């Protein structure tokens, strides 16, 4: 599911970067806009589950109808939408 969501993010125009986040930039990361581009920045040290959670949060309110996603991935995105409502 992680790889599937990473591909979906790229197809929606979200640039994924994995950075070493320390000092003033410490944290797990998140979605932001840099010079007009959406970017999902995540700490390199995040676990696969944390990466999955960040991707779900970033993508759950995006239009993904034209992107193939497995039924289990679509269900996870729908759960994320409902939790955020």
Image (cartoon, grey):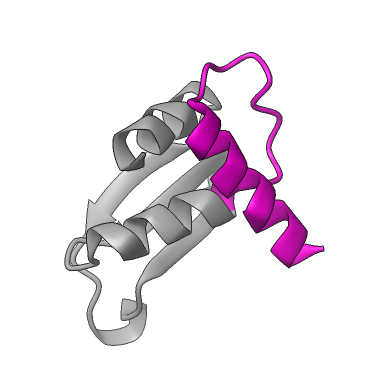
Question: Is residue 60 visible from the viewing direction of this image?
Answer: no
Residue 84 spot, x, y in % from top left: 74, 64
Q: Which residues are magenta?
A: 58-85
Q: Give the camera-side residue of 83 and 15.
A: 83
Question: Is residue 22 visible from the viewing direction of this image?
Answer: yes
What residue is drawn where x is 19% and y is 61%?
Answer: 44
What residue is drawn where x is 52% and y is 16%?
Answer: 68
Q: Is residue 62 above or below residue 67?
A: below
Q: Give the camera-side residue of 59 and 20.
A: 59
Where, by quadrant of the figure, is residue 61 drawn? top right
What residue is drawn where x is 36% and y is 39%?
Answer: 1
Residue 71 inside the magenta-drawn segment: yes
Q: Give the camera-side residue of 29 and 48.
A: 48
70 left or right, relative to 85: left
45 left or right, relative to 10: left
25 left or right, relative to 75: left
What residue is drawn where x is 71% and y is 65%?
Answer: 83
30 left or right, relative to 18: right
Q: Is residue 27 above or below residue 9?
A: below
Residue 82 inside the magenta-drawn segment: yes
Residue 2 spot, x, y in % from top left: 33, 42
Residue 53 spot, x, y in % from top left: 45, 60
């Amino acid at each position: 599911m992680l790889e599937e969501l990473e591909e979906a993010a790229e197809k929606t125009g979200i640039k994924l970067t994995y950075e070493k986040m320390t000092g003033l930039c410490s944290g797990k990361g998140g979605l932001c806009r840099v010079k007009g581009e959406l970017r999902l920045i995540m700490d390199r040290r995040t676990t696969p589950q944390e990466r999955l959670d960040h991707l779900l949060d970033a993508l759950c309110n995006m239009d993904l109808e034209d992107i193939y996603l497995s039924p289990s991935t679509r269900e996870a995105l729908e759960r994320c939408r409902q939790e955020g409502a």
